Image: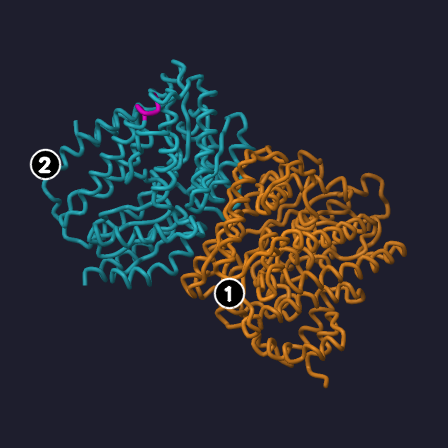
Chain colours: A orange, B cyan
Amino acid sequence: MADYYDEILRLCGFEDEEIEQERPRIEKSFERLGIGPEDMDTADSWVRHNHDVALKGVRKLLGAWLKELIDVVLAKDEGKKIVYFGFPAIPGPGLILSVSSKDVLVTAPDMVLDHTMGQIFNKLIPILEAGESHGLPPGHALCSLWQAKIGGIVKGMIPVPDLALASSYFCDMGSKADDLVTALYGVPVAYIDGVMDSHWGEYPEYLPERVHYLGAQINQALKKAEQVLDIEIVPDAWEKAQKGGQAFVTNLLKLLDLMKADPVPVSIADLEPLEALPGSSTGRGIREGIKTMDILIHELEERVKAGIGATQKGVPRVMIANGHCSDPRVTHLAEEAGLAVPLTFILSWNGGPPIKLKRTYATPGETIADYELAAGLFNGTDAQIKRFEMGADVMKLDGFILNYLYNCRPAATASHNQKKYLEEKTGLPVLSLEVDAFDSRAYSADSLRTKVETFAEMLKEKRRQQGDEKVI
Amino acid sequence: MKPLDKLNTHLASRLTDLQKAKEQGRKVIGYPAGGYFPEELALACDAIPISFIQAGNNTVLQDAGSYICRFFDPFWRSQVGYLTSGNDAYYTIADLLVIPITDNHVRVFSNTAGYYTPERESFVFGVPHVKDDIARDYYLQGINRLKRKLEEFTGVEITDARLRQSIELCNRERELLREISMMRKSPEYILASRDFVALNHGSFLADKAVMVEILESFLNELKQSSPLPTDGPRILFTGSTLARGDSKVTELIEDTGGLIVMEEFAEGIRPYWNKVGLDGDLLANLADTYFMDRVCPGWFRPGTERLDFLITLAKDYHAAGVVWYQLLYRESYKVESYFFPDRLKKETGLPMLTVESEYDAMETGPMKTRIETFMETLRR
């Protein structure tokens, strides 16, 4: 029997039989999330306005996030042991735990809330406000992802986890907020520590000590997880975990290859859900996401053949740091200003290290650590900037929009130096843009529009001066 | 001459002395005042350690604004401002910068040194955020690399004998600071915080042997002095950073009748509770004291050890209240300030006031009102 949510689920790529099969779980989780019939019109117009729903792959990608949401919300009711980790995270440890026991759910619930309650239902603000009134107040540049996580727990939307896997190798805020969860709910924490202590200019090299330290911390955290969750990590867990990860990377690289086309075949706002998926889900979300990528690849191949794109052919091309996780209007800004966005930093990072790994290790921890330090994000600021630099030739860029997160210290360390570095190294113009990629209240699309439009006009004018008469 | 006057006189000519020492071939090693740089290593190769400890001036933050966005701890933005502007000679006299990386606020400074001022050589090493054997080994590997770097930079081998000698000197300094500080456990008020902080800050800049002499004189005088005539509420003063030049909150507490009996800060106050062992592997001993034994700052995970320590200090020093002084955007302290007051209340019955600063003069009025009200509450 049809219900109020059937249409929105179909719009998000659910098949009818999936809806029927899931109906009791959908209803229970939606009730807990405060989603009702009154939200459906908003959700429908919000999704249609922000996403290219003509593409089945795009719709199903949103569906993958919704399935992850339902699983998270109901995890405790369904007898799962729950592990939360913070985004951005090294996904390996979570994947290892996930493949070791069907009774364990490992996820980044803040990202899940952003991509569903934000991107699909446009109902994130009350969750953020709940986080703000429970230890993470506004006005202090605190992480809005963490506000969503605390808010989701406080409001009873997502369950209190059995274990927190702290990303102590990147952000100080996340690990300290894990301490807050411990103080409020008594949740044990397994810290995976690391220090971003490379010398400026050292990347792509890094000290073997860093690999050993981070690797040993990963191995230690996994042991603690075994004890807390009362599970045993299966001997081939890492091999199994790698298979899923590799499938995602392979598909992502195919998609990025298609984004080299002119015009770019799809808006970057429609690839944004892929930015966070491998670093947020180790369960149904990422499994469904990988299948969805197959559909999307096929659809985009057809578009490239037909010369169909998200923007006009020949417009200037820019790389951005990342899309907006809860409000795609912000991600669309560049395209609305007449620029094509074929790549983001986070997508390029998800594509894996740009350098060949030379060493082999005896433990999964060290293997994972080496891969992640080579990939750049967790290495340090200059590694992150160099990954932008690599994007310039690959995607034939005309410029960069460096939308750094004001309330994410590891990202904001690059607020000024990345502009100077990239302008000098690539000769391309750079717009440095202060944003919040998880909460658009203070950094809305409209508040940023003038800056982006002005930059876009400059890039177009530069093209015209180079003799490109087609640029509008 | 009074010990504090002697310290002031010594510091007044310190830069000239440093310049002369450089002309004689000695190297000056600059490092930020976070407590993780073992000065013993610099002293053991006949170099002079000088700490970057100045902050509190909002104008410097404007200089820093050309290099980094606003959303970082103002102490670290001040370090960026001083380093890049060249407006403070302590920041330009250093031949080598040694930067122990703790959290992302410190990375702003190391990135600036590496990218914007490459003409000044810098050396970084990591300080883990957890305390276990693996982390201790990582810190030890870092100071081993530092030792090799300093030997190469100064051309002086750091032998065990030289290192032992410098450890003894630094131990004496720590021992004296500790003894002076612990006298404040007395129910009587015997030492103004501003004097103890002046000594502690001075120890980051002064010649080590001179500083030890000053501390010895100070301790002797203190033992013979009478208690200070005041009866205000005793305050445990804690936070992330208490820089030289950042005296606003201290003055407000003292001006409103509060008696600061203990300062617990991660940066700007030299850790003095532990001595470095002189037996066995001296580098390992340095790692034990500087990393494992030191009470961790708020950005360690978990921060429980420090919060336990605050409870102990509050009891041992007979505090009537806690003033928690955090710098804007230092998230570790902001988050802890939410859940610590409940624990403090349960275990000690004490109230806590949180104040926050970005070194802005505009803050003073509202801050004074809050501190006055807190003191009034404590008196009742």
Q: Nearer the viewer, mark 2 or mark 1?
A: 1
Q: Position of residue B10 (x, y in %)?
A: 27, 25
Q: Residue at x 71, y 61 (%)?
A: A289
On whether disc 2 and disc 1 are found on a single subunit, the reply is no
Question: Image quadrant of residue A109?
Answer: bottom right
User: Label 1 sits on what residue type?
Assistant: Pro
Residue contact at pointers 2 and 1, CB within 8 angstroms: no
Magenta stretch in the rendered image: B162-166
Task: Reply above or below: A358 against B147.
Answer: below
Q: Residue at x 34, y 29 (%)?
A: B280
In the rendered view, does A146 fall on the left or right side of A376?
Answer: left
Look at the image and say whether residue A287 sits in the magenta stretch.
Answer: no
Residue farthest top in this picture: B24
Helix, strand or loop under label 2: helix
The residue beneath circle 2 is B224
The residue beneath circle 1 is A161
Q: Position of residue A76 (x, y in %)?
A: 54, 71
Q: Residue at x 12, y 37 (%)?
A: B223
Structural crowding at the residue carrying mark 2, measured as other residues with C-alpha within 10 Å and reported as few (<14), some (14–19) or many (≥20): few
Helix, strand or loop under label 1: loop
Q: Nearer the viewer, residue A290 or A403?
A: A290
- In whole angstroms, how far apart are the C-alphas of marks 2 and 1? 58 Å
Task: Reply above or below: A368 against A333.
Answer: above
Look at the image and say whether residue B164 sits in the magenta stretch.
Answer: yes
Question: Image quadrant of residue A15?
Answer: bottom right
In the rendered view, does B97 fall on the left or right side of A71?
Answer: left
Magenta-drawn stretch, dominant element (helix, strand or loop): helix
In the rendered view, does A326 fall on the left or right side of B213?
Answer: right
Q: Position of residue A44 (x, y in %)?
A: 71, 73
Residue farthest right in this picture: A306
User: Label 2 sits on what residue type?
Assistant: Gln
